[in-house]
Image (cartoon, rainbow, N blue to C red):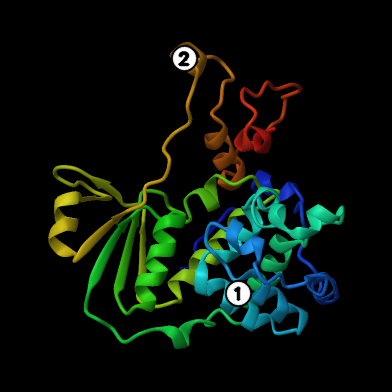
Amino acid sequence: MGYEIPKDRLETRLKDKHPLYTRAEAITEANRCIYCSDAPCVQACPTGIDIPTFIHKIATDNVRGSARTIFRDNLLGYSCARVCPVEVLCAGSCVYNHWDRPPIEIGRLQRYATENALVAAPDLLSKNRKPPTGKKIALIGAGPASLAAAGHLALDGHKAVIFDKNQIPGGLNTLGIAPYKLQADDAVGEVEFIEALGDVEIRTGVAVVEGDAGDGEVSTASLLADYDAVFIGIGLGPDNFLADAVEEGEGVEGATDLIARIKIDPKQTVDGVSRALVLGGGNTAIDIA
């Protein structure tokens, strides 16, 4: 815990696309929900969060209870509230869309509950922790998959040890999400929430390798020998390029690599860049644009 992120990094110049609701704004928006019996929003949520229940708790000013409902189904509910494409999932399935009315701002309400809970009650789920089992699990990679797995393992009483080659944990959330959605220090705050759930240890700057391990490395053989189980959460890998000639061209950058430098490298600038060509039209392309 206590990870240091440079203060003068480029991403701090970018403003939050959807600022945190005030208490009055959140309660007002929550009271728009009609709590559908079939809850199409829940059916559209990949993690199955009980959306009507957490919204109802916000409407009654029970913010911590709302956060508990969210975290019960999704321990990374805070970052999901910031980055999930709700317009094509939960909010996209809101019945208000059929009535030519704005859908419930589910993502912003979820952020309101989880962000306030992380600040005011970081030990919110400590009572849910089971007694220690003596089991020890290694997790490779400190991104969202490993963090969520480690959190659930810790709540079940197991010891979770995460290994990551980077010095700052969080994986995609810390290094790959556009700053206007989620900044690195906010992502690290969620990492610290996971660490506080139980016996979670994160070893940064340690690469997992096959064969003999050198300095700053640990071998797969030692993990298999020393731990009761090994979880692999290594992410999607490097950027794709059209061809080697394009990749090696002057001024050519991979989108996710550039986003990572914008988020944590204080030396990264865009000075002298007047025009840029972005190849692709997906979410990452839009983010880097």
Q: Quadrant of residue 70?
A: bottom right
Image x and y of residue 176, in percent: 55, 44
Disc 1 and disc 2 in contact, CB within 8 angstroms = no
| Residue 195 seen anywhere in this rendered image of the structure | yes
Q: Is residue 34 above or below residue 254?
A: below
Quarter location, residue 115: bottom right
Tag 2's secondary structure?
Answer: loop
**SS at circle 1:** helix
Rate crowding at label 1 as few (under 14), some (14 to 19) or many (20 or more) other CA atoms within 10 Å.
Answer: some
Question: Mark 1 = which residue?
Answer: 118
Q: Residue at x 80, y 53 (%)?
A: 98
Q: Residue at x 70, y 22 (%)?
A: 276
**First-in-chain label (1 vs 2):** 1
Q: Residue at the spot x=85%, y=76% of the render? A: 24
x%, y% of residue 221?
14, 51
Residue 19 or residue 38, whichever sits in front: 38
Residue 166 percent location from the top left of the image: 41, 49
Kindly tell me whether residue 269 is visible in this rendering. no
Q: Nearer the viewer, residue 288 or 85?
A: 85
Image location of residue 239, percent across then percent down: 48, 31
Quarter of the picture containing the C terminus is top right
35, above or below 220, in the image: below
Point out the residue furthest to the front here. 38
Image position of 289 with respect to 107: above or below: above
Residue type (three-letter) at the residue carrying disc 2: Ala
Q: Viewer-proximal residue, 174 or 106?
A: 106
- Type of amino acid under label 1: Leu
From the viewer's perspective, is 228 left or right of 188? Answer: left
Name the residue carrying label 2. 243
Q: State left or right for residue 35 relative to residue 212.
A: right
